[in-house]
Amino acid sequence: MLRSLDGFGFPADKVLLGQQRTSVLKKAGGDPRLIRHLLTDAGLWINLQASLKAHVETAYKFTFEYRGRDSGEEALNELPSIIREFNDLIWARLEGLNTKSQELIQTVCPTN
């Protein structure tokens, strides 16, 4: 079972968002490049979700193709649930990052 995302390089996301929050607060929206930077970062999370989806689909195809060849492999029988759990954990993390990015954008460019 997957219990932590730390092994997948995700702790850096907290550092990045922390740096962005600090930048937003220091500049108080006064830097015109700031919104462009925040929008680029927000797009990154969306691109990573698309990449995750493609990788998960490939993993499922691999699993079902090889599971049919050697149905005696217990690990292959468990792999679809492991892939699903991995996908759900990472997808939720990316959704959270996207939400936080949107909140930072709203801080810089509030809609009245």
Image (spheres, rainbow, N blue to C red):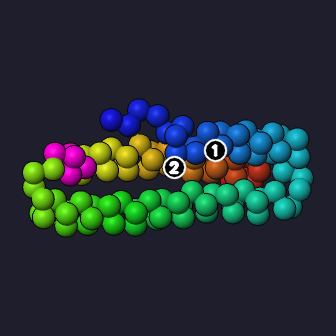
Nearest the viewer among 55 and 21 is 55
- Which SS class for mark 2? helix
Q: Which residue is mark 2?
A: 94
Going by the numbered disc 2, the residue's amino acid type is Leu
Q: Where are the magenta residues, as a range?
A: 74-79
Nearest the viewer among 73 and 58 is 73
Q: Earlier in the sequence, mark 1 or mark 2?
A: 1
Q: Is residue 77 magenta?
A: yes
Q: Quadrant of the N terminus?
A: top left
Near mark 2 (Cα within 10 A), the count class, few <14, some 14-19 or many ≥20, is many
Residue 40 x/y as whole percent: 69, 63
Where, by quadrant of the figure, is residue 65 drawn? bottom left
Q: Which residue is depicted at the point 25% across and 49% down?
A: 79
Q: Is residue 66 left or right of residue 1?
A: left
Q: Which residue is mark 1?
A: 13
The residue positioned farthest toward the top in the image shown: 3
Nearest the viewer among 14 and 86 is 86
Residue 26 x/y as whole percent: 88, 41
Going by the numbered disc 1, the residue's amino acid type is Asp
- Eye-nearest disc, 1 or 2: 1
